[in-house]
């Protein structure tokens, strides 16, 4: 029931360089639930990394998500899934804002008080706080390329507003 994160993000605040890749290989299942996520996001001129997952089964449920994205000039990374058996994406009981505000904040609210800083303020993660699925997105302010979502699995099951989206809304 805990919220967990694996992240390789570059943000607007004095980060110089490309985000690293996230590589996960397990002989077992990988489950992301209760708003947990894996992300590789860029908000500056540098590229985000790729997310590569090899597992028996993959389950994204109740706000679990895998995200690559761009909110800048850098390009988003790719999501590459090699799943031996099943992928199940179930959006039932996905957290909704404002209850998700424990982890996310309005992108536009700035504070000089470090104690008031949220765990995540990347626009893409804030926008997807109430979603479950796979996302390779660009925001309306981005000029970098969005990533690809490449899937190899025996079966993919969607339920309750589950998503697989690769979308560019920027220039």
Image (tube, rainbow, N blue to C red):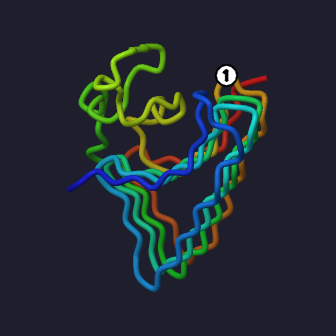
| Residue at image location 65% in from the left, 64% down from the top | 80
Q: Is residue 81 above or below residue 149?
A: below
SS of the residue under disc 1: loop
Q: Quadrant of the N terminus?
A: bottom left
Residue 79 shown left or right of residue 60 in the figure: right
Q: Is residue 22 above or below residue 9?
A: below
Q: Nearer the viewer, residue 143 or 17?
A: 17
* Mark 1 crowdedness (10 Å alpha carbons): few <14, some 14-19, many ≥20: few
Q: Quadrant of residue 9?
A: top right
For this orientation, the residue located farthest to the left is 1
Q: Quadrant of the C terminus?
A: top right
Q: Nearer the viewer, residue 143 or 161?
A: 143
Badge 1 is on which residue?
140
| Residue at image location 53% in from the left, 49% down from the top | 39
| Residue at image location 72% in from the left, 52% down from the top | 148
Task: From the top left corner, tell me how far across and down residue 139 is, in percent.
Answer: 64, 27
Task: From the top left corner, tell me how far across and down residue 102 is, in percent.
Answer: 26, 33
Residue 65 shown left or right of residue 19 in the figure: left
Q: How many marks?
A: 1
Task: From the top left corner, tell me how far across and down residue 94 is, in percent.
Answer: 31, 43
| Residue at image location 41% in from the left, 82% down from the top | 28
Task: From the top left corner, tell me how far across and down residue 129 is, in percent.
Answer: 40, 35
Q: Nearer the viewer, residue 21 or 68?
A: 21
């Amino acid at each position: 029931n805990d919220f967990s994160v694996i992240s390789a993000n570059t943000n607007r605040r004095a980060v110089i360089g490309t985000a690293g890749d996230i590589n996960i290989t397990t002989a077992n299942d990988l489950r992301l639930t209760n708003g947990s996520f894996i992300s590789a996001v860029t908000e500056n001129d540098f590229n985000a990394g790729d997310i590569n997952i090899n597992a028996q089964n993959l389950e994204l449920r109740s706000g679990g998500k895998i995200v690559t994205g761009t909110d800048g000039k850098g390009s988003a990374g790719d999501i590459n899934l090699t799943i031996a058996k099943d992928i199940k994406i179930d959006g039932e009981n996905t957290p909704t804002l404002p209850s998700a505000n424990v982890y996310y904040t309005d992108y536009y609210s700035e504070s000089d008080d470090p104690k008031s800083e949220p765990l995540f303020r990347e626009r893409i993660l804030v926008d997807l706080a109430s979603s479950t699925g796979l996302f390779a997105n660009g925001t309306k302010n981005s000029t970098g390329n969005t990533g690809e979502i490449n899937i190899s699995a025996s079966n993919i099951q969607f339920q309750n507003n589950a998503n697989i989206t690769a979308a560019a809304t920027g220039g």
